[in-house]
Image (cartoon, rainbow, N blue to C red):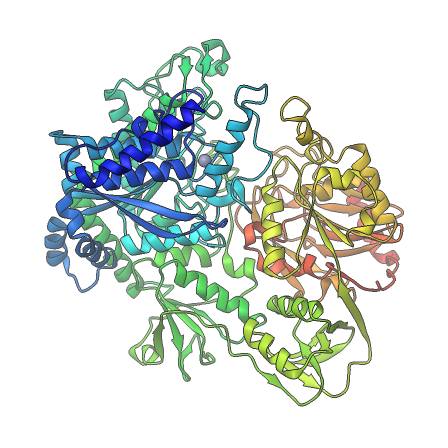
Amino acid sequence: MRVRNACSFSLVAALFAASALRGVSQVPTPISVLGHNPGDDYYLANYEEEIQYFHALAAHSDRIKMFTVGKTSEGRDIEIAVISSPENLAKLDEYKADTKRLSMAQGLDDASAQALAQQAKVIVHIDGGLHASEVAGPQHSMVLAYKLLSAQGDPEIDRILNNEILLLYPTLNPDGQDMVVSWYRKNLGTRFEVSPMPWLFQDYVGHDNNRDGYMLNMKESQVVTKTELEYSPAIFYCQHQTAPFPARIWIPPFSDPISSNISQYVRSWFNVVGTDMTAYLNGHQMPGAISESQFDNWYPGFVDYAGSFRNEISFFTETALYRYATPRFYTVDEFPKDRQDLKALTMYTTPWQGGWWRLKDAVDYMVAGSMSVLDTAARYHETLLYNQYQAARDNIKRYDQEPPFAYVIPSVQRDVPEAAQLAHIMLENGLKINATAAGFNANGREYPAGSWVILMNQPYAGLAKELFEVQRYPDAMDTGGTKAVDLPYDVTGWTLPLQMGVQVDAVTDPVTPEQRSHLNEIAQVDLPTAKVDGTGTEFVLSHNVNASFRLVNDVLANGGTVSFDNDQAKTAQGMEAGALVVNGVSRSTLTDLSSKYGVSALSVDKSPAHKTEIHRARVGLYRPWQASIDEGWTRWILEQYGFKPISLYNADMRSGGLKDRVDVIILPDMRERSLVSGFSVGIVPGEYAGGLNDEGLASLREFVRQGGTLVAFNQSAAALIPLMSLPVKNVLEGLKSDKFFCSGALLRVDIESRERPVTSGLPSEVSVMFEQGPAFETQPGFKGAVLARYPKDSNPLESGLLLHPEAIEGKIAALEVPYGQGRIFLYGFKPQWRGQSHGTYKFFFNVLYKYEQPAFVPEKPAAATSDKPKQAE
Ligand SMILES: [Zn+2]
C-alpha cells in the first residue's frame, strides 16, 4: 500500500507542477512519476502508466506533442509522441506537407526537390514494438523520450532535434502490453513468475499482429498505416526481442533474398543504418551485435517491413530477452558449441562473453539502437529526404517505360465484393486508384464501367507489383550444391489475386491519353451497387460470393430460411450450381441486406425443385491455452461473417456432452502434441496445463459419433488420423526438408465431389495456402469423399517455393470422412490463412450449417486401380 500511495502522490505532484514549469527544463524523470526506473528488475510499467508518464512529459516540455491516432481492438486509445525542437514542432504541419511532397515527388524536379530537402525535416518513426511478450520495447520508449527531452547542450541530441521529427509510439500494441504486465504481476514471486501467458497478446492474432502489414485486417495495423501515410517517415524502426543466442542484438543487413520491388535506395539504406548501429554499440562498449543471420525479409506482410514498398527504410532489430523483467545469468558453456570459442566474425564483430542479462540491459541496447538511428538520420537528413523523392521519381519513370503499365480489377467477375475489397486494401495502403468510365479498353477488351485501375507510374508502385505478381523464391536446390539463400523464414508466396480468388489483369502496353480519359481517381472504394431483380417471393443469390454468407447468416438469425440449390439455377451473375435460395424475409429486408453487403439477388416465383435446406449451427472453436494464432484468425473471420463462434476451452472439451452445446467443432492448425498434451504441468499454473487429454479426445469422438461435424485445419487434420483411427494416410509425415519442403506457398488444387454441399461455390480449380501441412491418401475401408486434390503429373506450385513437388502431386488436399453419425473434414492446408485466403473460405463456411447430408458415392474401381502404383512406390 505504501508504495502505491507514494507512486500516485508523485504522479499528482508531477502533473500539478506541470503548469508552473512548462518550458523550463524540469522534465520529470520516469521514477518521479512511476515510482520505478523503466528496466528495474521485476518491474514493468503497463500502458496506462506509460501514457501517464508521456503526458507528464508533454506537460513539462515544449519538445513533445501527444496525439491520439486511433483505437485498439479492445478500444484503448493509441497515442503517439511527436518529438523535435520547439521551433520544428511549431511548424509541424508545414514539415509534414514537405515530406509528403518529397515522398510523392509532387510537382518537383530534381533541383526543386534538392532545395526542399535542404529545408525540410526528416521524419523518423520509432516504436516500442508490437510483440507484447517482448517487454523491453515499451519501457525503452520512456527512457528514450526522457533522454531527448531532458538533454541540455548535448550536440548529438541538438542535431537530432533540429533536423528530425521523431514519431515515437510508446508501443504499437497497447492491449498486449496491459495483458502481459498484468499476467507478470500476478505471477511475480511465485514459481510461475516466468510462465508463458496462456492467451494471445492481441485479441485475435497475437504474434501475427506483425503479419498483417498489407492486408490490414486488424485495427492496430490500420492505424499504423494511416499514420504512416500521414507523416511519410523516411525511417520506420520497430523494436523486437528474439536475438539469435548468444548474440545480444540482431541488426540489419537482412539475409537474402530481398524483393526487387523495393527501391534501391531503401535496400542500401538498410545496410547503412545497420552497420552504423553496430558501430554505435561497439563505440558504447555494448558487445554482441549480430547481422544477417536468420532473418530474411521475403514476406512483405510484416507491419515493420511493408513500408519498405512505400520507399521507407522500414526495419527492426531483435534485442536479447530472458523473460519479462526477471534477470538471468548465462555462462559460456550454455552457448551453442560453435559460439563457445567467442571468436569474432564479420557479421558478429564483438562476441558476447556471457554474464548477467537484465531488463535494463535490453532497455539500454534498445535505447542505443534508437539513438543510433536518430544519429544516422541527423547526419544524413538531406540525403534521406532527397532519396525519398528519388525513389518516388524513379518508380514513376520506370512504369512509364516498362510493364506492367497498370493493373485492372474488373468490376464484373465471380465474386465482385471481394474484387472491391482488394481495391479497398490497395487504397488503404496508399496507392492511387481509378474507377473506369464506360469505354475503357485495354488488353484487347472493353472493361465494364466501375472497374478499378491502378496506374503503375506512381510512387508506391512496387507494393502493387509485390502483391499482385507471382512470387519466385530463389530455389535453394538449384544452385549446384552451394546454397545461395537459406530456407525461408516465413511464407514464400502470397499473390493476392490467387489468394482472394479475384481476377486482376496486368496491362502490358503503355497507357494512352485516350485510355486515361476514361479514368477517374477515387478517394474511397464503394461496394458494387447491388440489385434485387424480379418480382417473386423467393430470392436466389450467388454461392460464388463470400459476402452471400453474411447475408445468409443475417437471414437465418432473423427467422428466414435458406437452402442450397441442388441443380443449376439462374442467379444475378448467370447460371450456377448450388445457388443460395432465400425465403421467409420481406423484399425490403432483403433489399437492405443486399445493398449492405453488395450482393445482388434475383427474385423468382417458382422455387427450385431440388434443394437442401440449411439451418443455423452452433459453431464451436477449440481455444487452447497454448495460445493459438490460427484459432484467433479463425475466430476473427467467423465473427466477421456472422457465424458467432463459441470458444471451447480444455475444460469444455473434456467435460463431455459436447453435442448438447455445439453442432460443429473447428480445430485450428495445431500439432498433435499440442492438441493432446498442451502445456506440461509445472510450466503454467495448473488450470492452464494439459491439452484435450484422454477425456477431451473421448468426448470429441463421442461428439462426432452422435452426428457432430468436426473440421480440422492443417496439422490438426494430420493429428486426427491416428487420434480418430481414420482410414487415411498423411504421405508427407516425417519427410525432412531434403525430401519435401513448403513453408508457405500457393498451390493449385482441383475440386472433386462437386455434388456435395461442401464444394458449392468453389471454382473447379483453386489456389490453397499450403504451409507445412499434410497431404493425404485414402486407405482400405475409406467410405468418404475426396474434396480437393493436387494435380497429377504436374507441379501444383503457383506462387512461392515448393521443393520436391513430386511428393505431393496427385495427392489429396481435402476430404470428408464419415464417422459414426457425423463427419470429419480434413484440410491439409489453411483455408483461412491470416485472413487473406478469401478464395478458400467456402471450404469451411459451407459446413458450418446443419443440413441433411447426401449419401457418399462409392469410390469408382478405376480410381482405385490408378492409385495402386503410387502406393507401391
Ligand atoms: Zn517480435
Give the left or right position of residue 355, taking residue 495 as reference: left
Q: Quadrant of residue 183?
A: top right
Q: Residue furthest bottom?
A: 535
Tell me if residue 399 can be seen: yes
Q: Position of residue 775 (x, y in %)?
A: 70, 45
What residue is rendered at 54% in x and 70% in y?
417
**The N terminus lies in quadrant:** top left
Give the left or right position of residue 38, taking residue 162 as reference: right
- Is 404 in front, or is 312? 312
Q: Position of residue 576 (x, y in %)?
A: 69, 76
- Is 399 in front, or is 423? 423
Above or below: residue 362 compared with residue 111: above
**The C terminus lies in quadrant:** top right
Q: Position of residue 246 (x, y in %)?
A: 44, 19
Q: Quadrant of residue 173?
A: top left
Q: Quadrant of residue 384?
A: top left
Tell me if residue 572 can be seen: no
- Is 820 in front, or is 64? 64
What residue is rendered at 56% in x and 45% in y?
744
